[in-house]
Image (cartoon, helix red, strand yellow):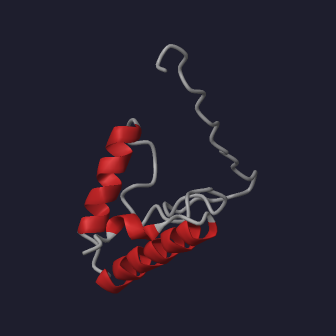
Amino acid sequence: MGIIPHKKNKRYNYTPRFYKGNGEGSPFEMKHKFDDFRSTVGSNGGIKSKLSSAFNELKNAPDKAASRRIVIIVFVLILLFLFFIDFDLSIFFSKP
């Protein structure tokens, strides 16, 4: 998978002709929406490092209610999927 290097996206670097930059950066700078809030955004290595950083962020998330809500939604979606494919849930329960 590492034989051919991935192509990096070109950065948009436009500077207007009569713009006086007073040190606050370009008003035309295009940056990611979540750069200031998340650590998983950006190029930080391969898929293993991205997954580990995402799990670390999930563990250290200050909003526990949102994490619990995501887990509940995923659980309900899995149950709905099993219901639609007519999966027999009785294999998980023992008969006396």
Name the one closer to the observer, 31 or 62: 62
Task: Determine the residue positioned at 26% across, 59% down.
Answer: 56
Q: Is residue 37 visible?
A: no
Which residue shows up at 42% across the image and 66% down it? 36
Q: 80 or 63, which is in the foreground?
A: 80
Whether residue 91 appears in this view of the structure is: yes
The extreme front residue here reads 96
Quadrant in which residue 54 is drawn? bottom left
Instruction: From this view, report whether residue 4 is shown above or below residue 48.
Output: above
Q: Position of residue 65 (x, y in %)?
A: 34, 86
Q: Quadrant of the C terminus?
A: bottom left
Q: Is residue 46 placed above or below 16 in the rendered structure? A: above
Left or right of 5: which side holds 44? Answer: left
Q: Residue at x 28, y 70 (%)?
A: 94
Residue 95 quadrant: bottom left
- Tell me if 39 is positioned left or right of 27 in this view: left
Report the number of discs. Answer: 0
Residue closest to the eye, 74 or 47:
74
Query: In this rendering, would 20 be left or right of 2?
Result: right
Q: Position of residue 49 (x, y in %)?
A: 32, 42
Position in image of residue 80 (x %, y %): 56, 74
**Residue located farthest toward the bottom when viewing the structure as drawn:** 65
Between 11 and 6, the one nearer to me in the picture: 6
The x and y percentages for residue 71 are 39, 74
Residue with the most extreme right position: 17
Q: Residue at x 63, y 63 (%)?
A: 27
